[in-house]
Image (cartoon, rainbow, N blue to C red):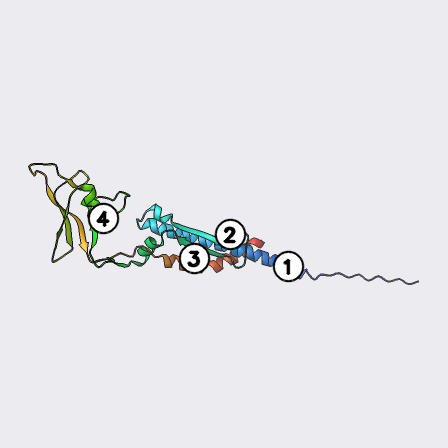
Amino acid sequence: MATSMKLKFDTTPDLVAAMAAEVNAGEKAVSAAMREAGTGLKTAWRGQITGAGLGRQLANSIRSQTYPKAGESLNAAALVWSKAPVIVGAHDTGPLIRSKNGFWLAIPTEAAGRGLRGGKITPGEWERRRGLRLRFVYRRRGPSLLVAAKARLNTRGQAVASRSKTGRGQVTAPIFLLVPQVKLPKRLDLDGDAERALDSVPGLIVAKWVGGKL
């Protein structure tokens, strides 16, 4: 009685499993690349802001977030933004600023000091705090002025009310320069950093995709 046996060796890989593994590797690579690009751009923008002398507080207004917030995706994306977009945008574009009502822009001098919250002081606040009236001085050439008469300069160079009855040490101090408009200098180049971050994404994806399988 003859018998026979048929042996079959299947060398074809499980394509479904292989494709699933490849998709999973791609999701991890894209998500990791977007996180790195977003974090890198946030760091670059913060560095620009502090390097321009605009302060750590404004630099820390730059935030980043990768989406989806949880999990990984081939469609992962990174968002980098500022919580103070008006201020950061002004230093990025260097806009021309005009008074809203067509009047003068009052730019405080060193003699004006600082506002209560550490910012720039306004003429109204200055008069209330110093107890002095400001006088308008028109100048044909150069900015006109708001000056304080019968004032004195304290040790910090700020104008305060003089208590002298003889007039000794009294000065007429320019407190504000008055201009119709002012052009802010462009101190940031955020687009340049954003373009470099965008250009780096394909290389990051490839590196993390290949590296993740080694």
Label 1 Cα neighbours within 10 Å, binned few <14 / some 14-19 / many ≥20: few
* Mark nearer the N terminus (1 vs 2): 1
Q: Which residue is mark 1?
A: 18
Q: CA distance from mark 3 to mark 2?
A: 20 Å
Q: Nearer the viewer, mark 1 or mark 2?
A: 2
Disc tally is 4
Please report the residue visible at 48 percent of the width from the left and 55 percent of the height from the top.
34
Contact check, label 4 and label 1, Cβ < 8 Å: no
In the shown orientation, is residue 104 left or right of residue 56? left
Please name whichever residue, 68 or 122, is drawn nearer the observer in this view of the structure: 122
* Mark nearer the N terminus (3 vs 2): 2
Secondary structure at badge 1 equals helix
Q: Which residue is mark 2?
A: 69
In the rendered image, residue 139, in percent from the top left (x then y), is placed at 12, 55
Label 2 Cα neighbours within 10 Å, binned few <14 / some 14-19 / many ≥20: few
Q: Which residue is mark 4?
A: 122
Quadrant, the N terminus? bottom right
In the rendered image, residue 189, in percent from the top left (x then y), is placed at 34, 57
The amino acid type found where label 4 is placed reads Thr
Q: Nearer the viewer, mark 3 or mark 2?
A: 2
In the shown orientation, is residue 52 left or right of residue 133? right
* Mark nearer the N terminus (1 vs 3): 1
Q: CA distance from mark 4 to mark 3?
A: 41 Å
Q: Residue furthest right?
A: 1
Please name whichever residue, 6 or 38, is drawn nearer the observer in this view of the structure: 38
Q: CA distance from mark 1 to mark 2?
A: 27 Å
Tell me, yes or no, if residue 5 can be seen here.
Answer: yes
Q: Which residue is mark 3?
A: 197
* Mark nearer the N terminus (4 vs 1): 1
Tell me, yes or no, if residue 157 can be seen here.
Answer: no
Q: CA distance from mark 1 to mark 3?
A: 32 Å
